[in-house]
Image (tube, grey):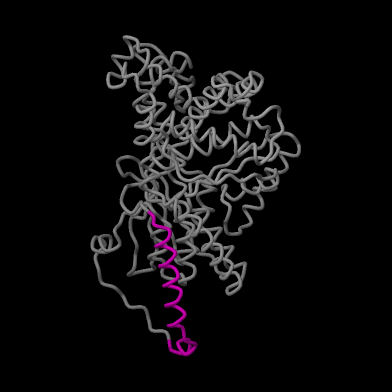
Amino acid sequence: MSALLFDGADWSFETIQRIYDRVEHIALHDLNLDVYPNQIEVITPEQMLDAYAASGMPIYYGHWSFGKSFVQHEGHYRKGYTDLAYEIVINSSPCISYIMEGNSALMQTLVIAHAAFGHNHFFKNNRLFREGTDASGILDYLQFARGFIVQCEETYGERQVERLLDAAHALRSHGVHRSARRRRIDFKAEQARAQERHAHDERMYNELWKTLPHAAPTRVATSEDRLARLLDLPEENILYFLEKTAPRLAPWQRELLRIVRLLGQYFYPQRQTKVMNEGTATYVHYKIMQTLHEAGNITDGAFLEFLTSHTNVVCQPAFDDRRFSSINPYALGFAMMRDLERVCVKPTAEDWEWFPQLAGCHDPINALKEIWAEYRDESFIAQYLSPRVMREWRMFQLVDDPSEAHLLVEAIHDERGYRRVRRALAREYDLSYSDPQIEVVAVDLEGDRHLNLQHRVREGRLLASREASEVLALLADLWGYPVVLREVDEHGNGLREHLCEPRIA
């Protein structure tokens, strides 16, 4: 009987099962990967475009921005400006991998290896995902979220729900807990608590309450320091603060903010691990495809097809190439994984100096698995970007000082520049550096109830005035009272102030 998994480009579901079984054997026994149960879904190009629009999720609530995203992707795809991804994978248990029906049998093998085992292992084992997400509960929570939002649209009107979701989406990047505290989300528990809150509101609701006169607001005599301690200020998670504290939000509106906030927190580890996640999946698919070819499970022609696709995926245009836009996370991640494998097996004197704990260990898979489990992009690059990779990539650090007429090459790939280049590149993947640091710092409950926010400016990078004003207007609508955003330098000196009043509904 032939050892070939397939012959030619055509495939059937029996072929997919045969491919999956062989890839699974290599992943679990040869590479010792640890994965969630897999669920493979074959979808059409239209379904892939729809998955793009909804963050890859099989279940998601409705919002106009998803339709806008669908139309944009579809237009570019139909005109040939962009290609569709070969797969999309979801951090859930079971781990759902979407594969395109138009893929060849070889590409189906590649994407199963890449997504169903490479990404899957990373999702299950990386500390950020392990401690910050709930893979077993996300699908049930998405089902609850969609049903709850549909119910709100029927009860309060689509326009009211849409306006609140618009505001919540605008603040989504400032709706996460970046520190370890309160990071872990148990979606099943969240769903149960939401249902309990809704049932309580239903029991307590009575039309007679509307006939009671409104009491004048009670003035709270409290110092700013005591109030700050009471509200646990400063607070970086603005959506969380609004959900708990905004005085004019109804219970259903707070629940919508909570849904957007929890889903934003669920996706936050993916923003921190793009290089590592894609590098891991690319390294895993490379090792699996190499093993398949050596075992005679795929032909030389199929392996050549794989190498062509793989080379395109890990291509990194030079800085002066017209195709260059940024560093390709697949390329950088894969290059670093392969280089660490070399350090483990065939170290040089330089490797012994830079990576004494890895050099010559002759166990690259377990060494890489430990790294995959414990690092994010910023710390991974800061720790493991080697001089060899910097030389091969011809890396250098460029400084653009607005006060100077010329750009300055601060460091290059030489003995004096290695650590500076590595440090500078790692910082580009540090979200605490790249994302604006905006916090709620004070609330005036004794006067006009205005909300005070502060943006700590780094390296003179102020917020764009127009975008800041638009987002603050949405924030003021949620808060219900004036919002003040002050931009300050590293020493606390004021640089600029934005004031926004809530708009009348």
For this orientation, the residue located farthest to the top is 349
Q: Position of residue 366 (x, y in %)?
A: 36, 28
Q: How many marks?
A: 0
- Residue name at image x 29 percent, y 59 percent: 232
- Residue name at image x 55 percent, y 60 percent: 165
- Magenta span of residues: 185-213
Quarter of the image that includes the C terminus: bottom right
Residue 114 covered by magenta stretch = no
For this orientation, the residue located farthest to the front is 1
> Viewed as shown, does residue 188 lie left or right of 466?
left
Q: Magenta stretch: dominant SS?
A: helix
> Looking at the image, which is closer to me, 214 or 492?
214
Vertical comparison of 384 with 239: above or below: above
> Viewed as shown, does residue 302 lie left or right of 172?
right
> Viewed as shown, does residue 331 lie left or right of 491?
right
Q: Answer with the quarter of the image where residue 72 lies.
A: top right
Quarter of the image that includes the N terminus: top right
Residue 197 covered by magenta stretch = yes
Vertical comparison of 344 with 145: above or below: above
Vertical comparison of 90 with 209: above or below: above
Q: Position of residue 35 (x, y in %)?
A: 44, 41
- Residue name at image x 58 percent, y 31 percent: 110
> Looking at the image, which is closer to me, 360 or 55?
360
Q: Answer with the quarter of the image where residue 351 lies.
A: top left
Q: Position of residue 464 (x, y in %)?
A: 51, 44
Q: Position of residue 241 (x, y in %)?
A: 38, 60
